[in-house]
Amino acid sequence: MDLTPWLQSLENSGLAASLRYSLYLFPFLESIHVMALALVFGTILVVDLRMLGLASTHRPFSRISSELLRITWSAFAVSALTGTLMFVTNARVYFHNTSFRVKMLLLLLAGINMAVFHLTAGKSPVAWDREPSAPRLGRITAAISITLWIAIIVSGRVIGFTTTGAQAKEAPAPTGNFEDFLNGTPDSAPPPAAAPAPAPTPTTQAAAAGSGPSDLTIKTIMDSMVDPSGDYLFESVVDVADEHGITHKAPSTPQQWAIERQHLQILIDGQNLIIAPGRRVGNPGDHSKDPKVELEPAQVQALIDSQHDEFVVRAGRLRDAAILGLKAVDARDPKALLVAITAIDKACESCHLHFFYPNDKRAHQAAKEEGGIIE
Amino acid sequence: MNDFAEWLSATVPSVFLQTHEAWMIPVIQSLHIVGIGTAVGSALMITLRVLGWAGMDQSLLQTQRRFGPWLTGALYLLLASGTLLIIAEPVRELVTLSFWLKMAFVAVLAVLATTFQASVRKNAQSWEHTLPGRPSIRLAAMLTFVLWASIIILGRLIAYDHIWGHLSPATKA
């Protein structure tokens, strides 16, 4: 059974969206989750140690368990609720995460272990209520319980370390004209004007491949496609001043022109992926590398969601500039290529100034001085 | 503090932890949470006894003797694992408002807990029956538990210091 559509609809729910877009709700949920699970573990430990005969041995077991049971279950309910809310924010990623699955399995085992206790030693606690420890089977279930709950804590913590950086690894490579282009020879590539393909929507993507390439976030697309290709382009056409005097660096061999073309095409495809409706900036847990200047992913998300048309317009300038670059490549014109690449640089900066680091006064000033598009 | 954090992150133990961070940090953090569970469970039992809500078949002193050592032991585990986490990620920990608020609360809690322990030992006889009735003591017990909850929440918020906005040192140069 394929649960992807169902998980997707969880993620698309208004509740999940508002949790994702808020700067405060996810951290708040996670904090309450940790507090509740600390209480679950702490109270279960008291009961299990009593059964093992390691603590509170002179107190009747039934008294301890009846005092703590309500607290344990209330705290468990809070953990389950906060856990569920965290799950829906990114249901598909968590669902496919190994640590998450291990944790759910361990929780199931803890439930079975508890049932075994209640059907055996727990059935007649009166018989050993005042004994220093539970009967053998009771002691075994107590030891298993402590072990399982520690393992649940560990697997839960590991989820946070395997769901943020793992998207790039888990998500299948983007398909479509990007791959077609890389497989074909540069000269037989489609004419630039025809290059922009219809933007894939998350639903069609999810239907196309199990775990869904829409797990791909803007951050991942920027890091793995747009930034490296942009860097290559900016370095490829420059004036170098060194001990040999000033050299104009530009592509000259057919091979170099072909590589230039590939990177321009990657920018166009990256832009298409970025503006796809429903595309997310980052995953919960992703953070701004430099909060002094850059907004947090959730803040960028809120900005983009509130001005999606504006976002598409600004991202479109990148595509237009890259198409200009493709024309320059086809004409083997280094000067036109430099103009196009300068336009690419300004397009990046213009969109970043608006959505990525709007509070960075220095970048605004620099853009103004360089004649960038800032409005 | 920024400079100290930068310096610490270049030391040998920090570099060692950083190069093994893939599994070390989750494991140390998990130990830290196990310690929190043990400590908060023990603190809860003492609090409930002071409030007269549980463990009334035990004297205050008996309750203190049962859970005090577990609380202290868990605090040592928390101190050790917490120190390792600071060494592993000095900037992430030290350059946050959440961390320092948490430390301030821990300091207040330590003073409260030590005072309480000493008083229980000293006044064991007279407190046994009068204590749960005193509104000031009940309030203090509840406040202590609120302090525990705040410490746990702040601990998790270290990872999300941006929620403090401009109050967070991470947003300053």
Image (cartoon, coloured by chain):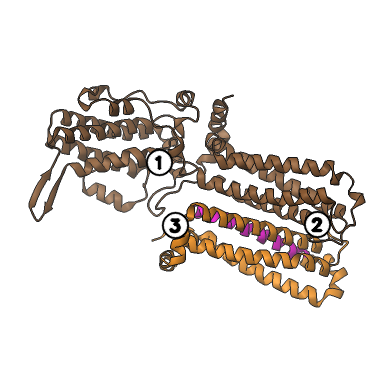
Chain colours: A brown, B orange
CB atoms at circles 2 and 1 under 8 Å apart?
A: no
Amino acid carrying mark 3 in the image:
Thr
- Marks 3 and 2, Cα distance to the nearest angstrom? 41 Å
Residue toward you, A55 or B94? A55
Residue occupying image coordinates x 85% and y 46%: A122
Q: Which residue is mark 2?
A: A50
Q: Secondary structure at mark 3?
A: helix
Which dot marks residue A219?
A: 1
- In the displayed structure, A44 sits above or below A334; it is below
Residue toward you, A19 or A177? A177
Q: Is residue B140 left or right of residue A249?
A: right
Amino acid carrying mark 1 in the image:
Lys
Q: Secondary structure at mark 2?
A: helix
Amino acid carrying mark 2 in the image:
Arg
* Protein chain holding label 2: A
- Marks 2 and 1, Cα distance to the nearest angstrom? 50 Å
Counting from the top left corner in percent of width and height, residue A367 is at 25, 47
Q: Residue furthest front?
A: A136
CB atoms at circles 1 and 3 under 8 Å apart?
A: no
**Range of magenta residues:** B138-164
Residue occupying image coordinates x 73% and y 68%: B69
Which dot marks residue B19?
A: 3
Question: Is disc 3 surrounded by few (<14), some (14 to 19) or many (20+) residues within 10 Å?
Answer: few
Q: Secondary structure at mark 1?
A: helix
Counting from the top left corner in percent of width and height, residue A4 is at 54, 28
> Is residue A12 found inside the magenta-colored segment of the image?
no
- In the displayed structure, B21 sits above or below A237; it is below
Q: Is residue A357 left or right of residue A10?
A: left
